[in-house]
């Protein structure tokens, strides 16, 4: 089988990996460089962790996610995962961190619960008395996205896959199994896989009612000098509690301390628009984190990076068939960690498998 893949984010790259491993021919077309810094998969790092709320449906898929990454590390010959563990901080009864803790209990996963005083003593960047408790788990950490993308591209090229970067697809014809390129060229294949992230609805406008592109920004910070050591050994922080919807990745894999918040996202009609950071945007994201982060004003904004990603209404992943084309969106705010598992599942579905089963798995069923 010959497959044309539109989009070189983690979903497209990992699908290419699994298809090539199964003996299929692949042409992967990416509008920018790989990784594309404007894409959801193009930042330095993303969190992987066990914790999902018990009712999310994704908790069961995490073991498969870890197994798929292990298979990918074996193939590319490198491990781009920093297993520094993860923690969450609860500030209010029933907040996201507390729901994650319930998920840890339901799954039987290992964790240590620390009351506020013990957590603030262990993690000097937390403001004492600003939160209820924290829990830490050894099973999680940071995936190094840019290194994963670079090694996957090299692995794919070595095995004969055709990788066309800086090449934009302007139309997909599912019935014919073809894609049209911006330079007027055309590619045909047995199947077309569209993994175009926040640009998907430009290629498949009928999905605009289902997939909503959003813009957000994350901030890279330099902590006060006396807290550098505390951050260097800290786990990733999945949630800082309360309404912030905030996560933190400590310095890892050569990248700096990153803060991001779900509060700081907004719908966008065009994933390419408004991609320069706005004045004061880094400080605005940073300041959402106090409490529970102490001395927030002493953190210097080093860089601000905008991102575009696509949400379904319930933040579940999604696929749809259009003739010979399969559209897959594992975008949302939590899809990277499943990248290798998604790739294997998509390859199986394209290889005579059951797209309905893929859709159910993607939706956390
Ligand atoms: C700020 C932020 C933080 C996140 N944090 C986490 C996290 O900690 N853990 C986690 O698991 N997930 C996280 N996610 C979600 C995760 O990043 C996404 O789920 C995942 O990266 C989506 O990958 P993708 O391949 O589907 O899309 P993308 O990475 O967006 O890739 C799509 C690719 O298609 C290309 N493309 C689009 N249109 C065309 C075209 N017409 N022609 C050619 N190429 C095209 C784009 O340039 C792009 O490279 C986060 C997302 C954001 C935005």
Image (cartoon, rainbow, N blue to C red):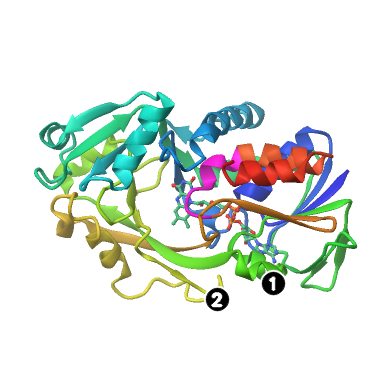
- The answer to which of 180 and 105 lies nearer the viewer is 105
Q: Which residue is mark 2?
A: 269
The image shows residue 308, relative to residue 124, as above or below, that is below
User: Is 337 part of what is drawn in magenta?
Assistant: yes
Q: Which residues, given as a range, are shown in magenta? A: 332-340
Above or below, 348 relative to 292: above
Q: Residue at x 49, y 42 (%)?
A: 144
Picture quadrant of ligand 1: bottom right
Residue 205: mark: 1
Q: Is residue 336 visible?
A: yes
Q: Position of residue 82 (x, y in %)?
A: 43, 33
Question: On the image, which quarter does residue 361 sit in?
Answer: top right
Can you give x and y, in whole percent of width and height, for residue 163 in the image? Answer: 75, 52
Quick check: 211 above or below 289?
Answer: below
Residue at image location 36% in from the left, 27% down from the top: 138
Q: Earlier in the sequence, mark 1 or mark 2?
A: 1
């Amino acid at each position: 089988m010959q497959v044309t893949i539109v989009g070189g984010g983690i979903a497209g790259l990992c699908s290419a990996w699994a298809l090539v491993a199964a003996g299929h021919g692949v042409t992967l077309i990416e509008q920018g460089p790989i990784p594309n810094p404007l894409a959801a998969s193009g930042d330095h790092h993303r969190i992987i962790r066990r914790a999902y709320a018990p009712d999310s449906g994704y908790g069961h898929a995490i073991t498969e996610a870890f197994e798929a990454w292990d298979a990918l590390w074996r193939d590319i010959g490198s491990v781009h995962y920093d297993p520094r563990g993860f923690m969450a901080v609860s500030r209010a009864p029933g907040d996201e961190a507390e729901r994650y803790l319930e998920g840890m209990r339901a799954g039987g996963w290992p964790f240590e619960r620390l009351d506020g005083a013990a957590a603030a003593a262990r993690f000097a960047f937390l403001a004492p008395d600003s939160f209820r408790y924290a829990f830490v788990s050894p099973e999680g950490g940071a995936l190094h996205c840019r290194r994963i993308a670079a090694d996957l591209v090299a692995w794919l090229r070595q095995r004969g896959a055709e990788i066309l970067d800086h090449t934009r697809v302007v139309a997909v014809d599912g019935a014919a199994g073809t894609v049209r390129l911006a330079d007027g060229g055309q590619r045909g294949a047995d199947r077309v896989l569209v993994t175009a992230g926040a640009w998907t609805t430009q290629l498949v406008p009928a999905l605009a009612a289902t997939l909503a592109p959003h813009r957000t920004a994350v901030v890279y910070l330099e902590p006060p000098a006396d807290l550098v050591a505390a951050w260097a050994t800290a786990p990733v922080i999945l949630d800082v509690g309360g309404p912030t919807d905030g996560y933190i990745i400590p310095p890892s894999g050569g990248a700096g301390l990153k803060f991001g918040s779900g509060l700081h996202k907004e719908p966008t009609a065009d994933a390419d628009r408004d991609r320069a950071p706005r004045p004061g945007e880094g400080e605005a994201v940073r300041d959402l984190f106090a409490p529970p982060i102490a001395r927030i004003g002493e953190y210097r904004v080093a860089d601000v990076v905008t991102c575009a990603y696509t949400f379904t209404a319930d933040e579940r992943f999604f696929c749809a068939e259009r003739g010979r084309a399969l559209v897959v969106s594992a975008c949302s705010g939590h899809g990277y960690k499943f990248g290798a598992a998604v790739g294997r599942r998509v390859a199986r579905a394209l290889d005579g498998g059951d797209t309905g089963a893929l859709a159910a798995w993607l939706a956390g069923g």
